[in-house]
């Protein structure tokens, strides 16, 4: 018996087929297929909410990559500014009857916005001047008192070391530009020996405050 074995036929590329494969490969390299594909991917090709922080390279995004108006509570650089000054040299024999600055600071508002102002001071009765002193103090903006009501330090008796301290705050709207904020004081009766005092100011581009001068509230009836 004679047995015949049939070998499978192998397909061979023709000269034309080889040329086609080589041409496609060369075209892919010349076009840079991966980079071209990346350029063709847009937001429309990505499913909403499918990307997470893990898909973004750490520290690769900058402020220019974010649409600022879509962010709430995030401020641009330079939109918040702080200013302040402090004095430690005492003021002896303070008997001025009109409000006068005892410490002040220059403020530059980059835009219209709001100022948050805090002023503090400590003082004692000037025992070299007859009578018990009474120091009133407040805050001013560009030379105008921010409140018709005032804070006061009353000294109980004329003794050395009989000192007191107090603070005043204000939140007021302000226009863009240069301003002067001051802690002011005046003395009623006797005299005062003003010790340390400070004024601090924070500017923010938005918020609300009172329109100066603020009026003191009427006393409540009993």
Image (cartoon, grey):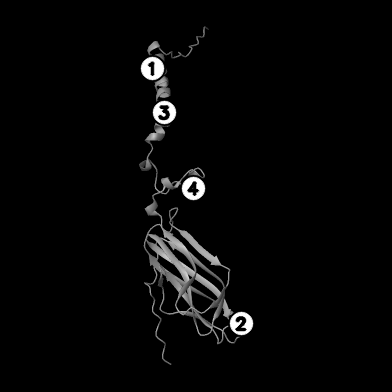
> Which numbered disc, 2 or 4, marks the residue that appears first in the sequence?
4
Image height of 170 relative to 64, above or below: below
Image height of 179 relative to 218, above or below: above
Residue 206, horizontal then vertical, whole percent: 39, 62
Residue at far top of view: 2
Dot in front, 3 or 1? 3
Q: Left or right: 156 with respect to 186?
A: right
Find residue 111 and report its image quarter: bottom left
> Which numbered disc, 1 or 2, marks the residue that appears first in the sequence?
1
Q: Which mark is residue 20?
A: 1
Query: What is the CA distance from the residue labelled 1 to the residue labelled 2?
Result: 102 Å
Dot in front, 3 or 2? 2
Label 3, on which residue? 33
Mark 4 element type: helix
Please tell me how crowded label 2 is: few (under 14), some (14-19), or many (20+) other residues with Cα within 10 Å.
some
> Which numbered disc, 3 or 2, marks the residue that appears first in the sequence?
3
Do the residues bearing badges 1 and 2 touch, measured as CB atoms within 8 Å?
A: no
Image height of 24 relative to 75, above or below: above
Residue at far bottom of view: 222
Q: Left or right: 193 with respect to 177?
A: right
- Judge by depth and name the residue closer to the eye, 62 or 80: 80
Residue 127, horizontal then vertical, whole percent: 60, 83
Query: What is the CA distance from the residue labelled 3 to the residue labelled 4?
Result: 27 Å
Label 4, on which residue? 53
Dot in front, 1 or 4? 4
């Amino acid at each position: 018996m004679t047995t015949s074995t049939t070998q499978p036929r192998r397909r061979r590329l023709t000269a034309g087929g080889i040329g086609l494969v080589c041409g496609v490969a060369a075209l892919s390299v010349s076009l840079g297929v991966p980079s071209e594909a990346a350029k063709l991917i847009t937001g429309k090709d990505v499913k909403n909410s499918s990307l997470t922080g893990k898909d973004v390279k750490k520290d690769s995004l900058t402020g220019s990559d974010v649409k600022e108006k879509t962010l709430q509570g995030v401020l641009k650089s330079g939109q918040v500014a702080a200013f302040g000054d402090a004095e430690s040299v005492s003021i002896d024999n303070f008997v001025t009857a009109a409000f006068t600055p005892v410490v002040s600071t220059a403020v530059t508002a980059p835009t219209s916005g709001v100022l948050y102002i805090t002023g503090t001071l400590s003082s004692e009765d000037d025992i070299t001047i007859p009578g018990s002193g009474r120091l009133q103090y407040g805050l001013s903006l560009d030379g105008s008192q921010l409140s018709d009501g005032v804070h006061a330090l009353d000294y109980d008796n004329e003794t050395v070391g009989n000192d007191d301290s107090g603070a005043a705050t204000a939140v007021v709207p302000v226009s863009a530009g240069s301003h002067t904020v001051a802690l002011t004081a005046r003395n009623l009766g006797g005299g005062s020996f003003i010790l340390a005092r400070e004024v601090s100011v924070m500017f923010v581009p938005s918020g609300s405050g009172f329109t100066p001068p603020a009026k003191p509230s009427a006393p409540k009836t009993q």
